[in-house]
Each structure stands twice: as structure tokens, then as C-alpha cells.
Amino acid sequence: MRIMRSWIDLHARPTRGAKLLLGGLLAFAPACSDSGAGEGEDETGESEASTSSSGESEDETGSVDPLEVGLEIRDNPDMVIGPFGDVSVEGAVEVRVRVFENGEELFVRPADMPGTNHSAFLWGLHENGSFTAVAEARNGVDEWYSSAEVAFTTPALPPGLPPAEISISEPGRAHEGLVLFGTTAADERMVYVGYDNEGTIRWYHEPGGDGSRSGGDVKVLEDGRLFMFRPGGMRTIWPWGAIDFDVDLSYHHDIDPLPGGGYLVLVRREETWNIDEFGGPATIEADGILEFSPDGEILKEWWASDHLDVQRWPSSMGKNMEPYDWTHANAVHYVPEQQRVYMSLRHQHWILAIDWPSGEVDWRLGPDGDFSFDGPPEDWFYDQHSPQLQEDGTLLLYDNGNERPGPDLYSRAVIYEIDELGMAATQVWDHAFTPYTRVQGDADRMPNGDVLICAGGVINSGNIARIIQATTDASSEAVWELRLPQGENVYRATYVDGF
């Protein structure tokens, strides 16, 4: 990356609030006051606002010396298209960096990265680009001062990151953020990639390790860190790629972060039972949940065989050899307000609601479960993934549909209304598509109410992994769709407005 460092003393210049668009990435630049007399100033031109006490010198009239603002663009060793803007200034109450390409403003980023004096993470750039940047700092009387313009470039992305094709994009309706997911690079290493709504890579992270059999998932924590799987373990990172926490861990399918820093992990063990389905003693895989403290201590164990009937084998899958795959858990989702864990059991066609303090199963949702269902059998879910309780109490999940009754095979995202008083379930929305995905899958609610659907489980199917944005109104329309090259597989996808 070519970088320049520049210093300049400038009196406040007017900078107006602007709505900024970066390949669909939306940001707002705060409006700034002019340096001349205007609102909030008396006849002498002095501001009625209180002056800053953070380092500017004042004369007897109360005027403030100009701020000296410097900017340096610093390479990011963890993400070549996400450099840092380091701002040097004293006495400022707000600092930001503006970035331009071909003379047009791309975005504004606050220089408030944790643990820094005044640094901005300049996310949202692309590879092989030429850009300029200007730092701005505000003093205590709402006057803004700028650095000189600094030119810099971004290099090529690491080799092997998969290109994307956008097959559907409805103007004004497609998302304006980033879609993040884990996949496999050309050399089969695991990578996480973030695409904008035009299919351009604007973010990435390389956890290392063999990605050919790893399911990637990114979960955004309340403090902005990203929680993710990696081959043989898990980690949390800051959005710019710096690792905050990393641990080797044996798990399968899912890890769910808990408030306070602990986490739930799906595990399995072999057990031997007399199983009618197999005519006597048989070894089965029993799924369980382990709760870990932040420092890795196991606080609690929960095992399906302590709570469910081991004679129930409704699925045709998992029966070809010992140990037989009895429940095939693939998701665990903790809701702190309820102190409940929602657990997906693919080979039971069930979602469990578990009272976590007691470990008791509150209910089983799905065919032959605890709820009556106002609909045909094919409207239940079959071989599902990724249940998520919504703010309105409904349940969103990804329905693979492998063993759906009837002649048609299709997958879908689906929402059910759950009446726990009347013990009744009702389908209230779905978005179905073909070809169906027999494995994996995800469905997440987006900030605007749409659903992001990850139809990426295409291992050995010859189909193409797709990420779909669908509306949740009656039309259930696909307004955006990303497609990856054949051979790429995606477990789950996550939407973010930005970092």
C-alpha cells in the first residue's frame, strides 16, 4: 500500500451533512457548523456554546486556537482492503476520516476504535483501488479542522477468494450492507468473506485450517465483536480482524455465545441401548449440550437420551451403520429473557424448547410433537436447521424438506406462530425455492424485516450455493440473490449494516 503522511493547520471549513453510498453501504456524515456568525452566535461572532477544555488555548475574548490535524494511512496486516486511518490531534472532541475515490466521497468513518487514540477502521474498500482520505476534528465550540489530503492504494485480495454473481437486485429494496459467510478458498483453506449488494468483496477474515469440511458461522456480539467457528475451535475477532479470543474446542454444528462470555456447545457421545428399530442392542450417537464458563470450565451437561424416547426414529437418515445417528442436533440458540435453549434435532423433525435452569423440555415442535397444527402435513418442517426466536414470539427456521410428504422436493425459510397456552402452531409465512438443499442452511431476520436465506448446502449435489433476501409480506418476493461458483458450499450467512 502506498501511503503518505501530511500535517496542516486550517481554520474551520463548512462541511454539510451528506448521505453516502458505497456500493450500497449507507452511512451518514454529521452536519457541521460554519465558521462565520450564525445560529448560536452573538453579534461579536463568539459562540454561545461552551468552549472546549480539552487542550485548545483561549484568549480573553474566548476564541479558540485552530486544531492541528495529521493523518496517516496504516496497513492492516489482517485485511489488506481494510487499512486504518490514524489521526494525530490534541484537544478534539470528535474525530473522523473521509475517504474518496475518483473525486467522489465514498464514506465517513469515526476515529474511535477501542484502545486507540484516534484511529478509524476504513472498511468498505475494494482491491486494487486508488483512494484519498482527509481527517477532520471538531473542537469544543463545534468548529471543524481538516488535515491535508492523503493518497493511498489497496493491493489485490489474497488468492482464491470466490467471486460472486448477483442474479437478482431490486433497486431501493435490496440490502445496503454486507453479507458475511464462511466458505472454502481455491486451495481449500477456510475463509470468511463479506460481499456488498453488488457482489464485491469488501471484508474478509482468514482463520486458517482446512475449510473443506468446516461449517462457517458469524454471530455479531453486542460490543461489535464477531464470534465465529474455525476448524478445530472458535474465536472472537474485532471487525478489522484482530483476534480477541481463540480456543481449540471439540464441537459439532453449533456454538452459541452467552451473556457474560460463556458459551453453549453441541457435542455427541456413543451410547448403547436396546432399540426396537434395530432388533436389540445398538450403539447410537446421542446429542448433548455443554455450557462453558468464559475460562473454559464445564458448568453444565444436558443429554437428549435423558429426556427423549430413544425408540423414536422417524427419519430414514442416520440408519445405515453404527453408531446410528439418532437425533442429529444441528443448532442451539439461547434466549436469556426466557432462560430457554432452543435446539434443532434434524432426524426427529423437532425443535425443542428447554428450560435451561432445570434442563426440562418445555415442548417439542414438529410432526407428532406437543402442538396441534392448523395445516397439511407438508407445511410442517422436515430435516430442518437454524431455529431463531423472533421479537414477536414467532419462530423462524430453515426447512430443508428432505422427507417432506408428497411428490415435491423444495426447501424454504418459514415462520411459525407458537401459542403456548392453547398448544397450537400456525404457519404465518414462508419463502420456498428449488432446487432444494438437502443439507445445511440458515434463515435470519434483517433489520428492515426481510429474511436473509442461506441456501448454501449444495455438497455433492451439482447445484449452486445461493444467498437470498426475501420480503416477509404476502408476496414473499426475492429482492436480492447472490450466487457462488459451483463447488462452493455455505453453511450459514449473516447480514450486517456495517461495523
Image (spheres, rainbow, N blue to C red):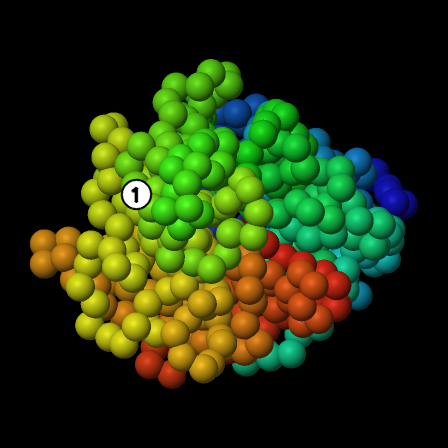
Q: Position of residue 451 (x, y in %)?
A: 44, 65
Find numbered disc 1 in the image and state the secondary structure of the residue it sits on: loop
- Side (left or right) of 88 relative to 435: right
Q: What residue occupies the far front of the structure in this picture?
A: 279
Closest to the observer: 450 or 388? 388
Residue name at image x 78 percent, y 45 percent: 189
Quadrant hosting residue 177: bottom right
Q: Residues within 10 Å of mark 1 (few under 14, many from 20)?
A: few
Residue at the extreme right: 2
Horizontal arrangement in the rendering, residue 20 relative to residue 192 (left or right): left
Residue at the (66%, 33%) spot, across then down: 232
Q: Considering only vertical position in the picture, is 12 above or below 437?
A: above
Residue 36 at x, y percent in the picture: 53, 52
- Residue 346 visible in the current orientation: yes
**Residue 123 visible in rendering:** no
* Front-most of residues 57 and 140: 140
Q: Residue at x 21, y 43 (%)?
A: 362
Residue 446 left/right relative to 466? left
Tell which residue pokes out farthest to the left in this image: 422
Q: Nearer the viewer, residue 172 or 141?
A: 172
153 versus 65 height, above or below:
below
Residue at which label 1 appears: 309
Residue 339 in percent (x, y) is at: 26, 35
Which residue is found at the position 86% from the left and 42% from the top?
A: 4
What quarter of the picture does the N terminus occupy? top right
Residue 392 position by quadrant: bottom left
Amino acid type for the residue under numbered disc 1: Asp
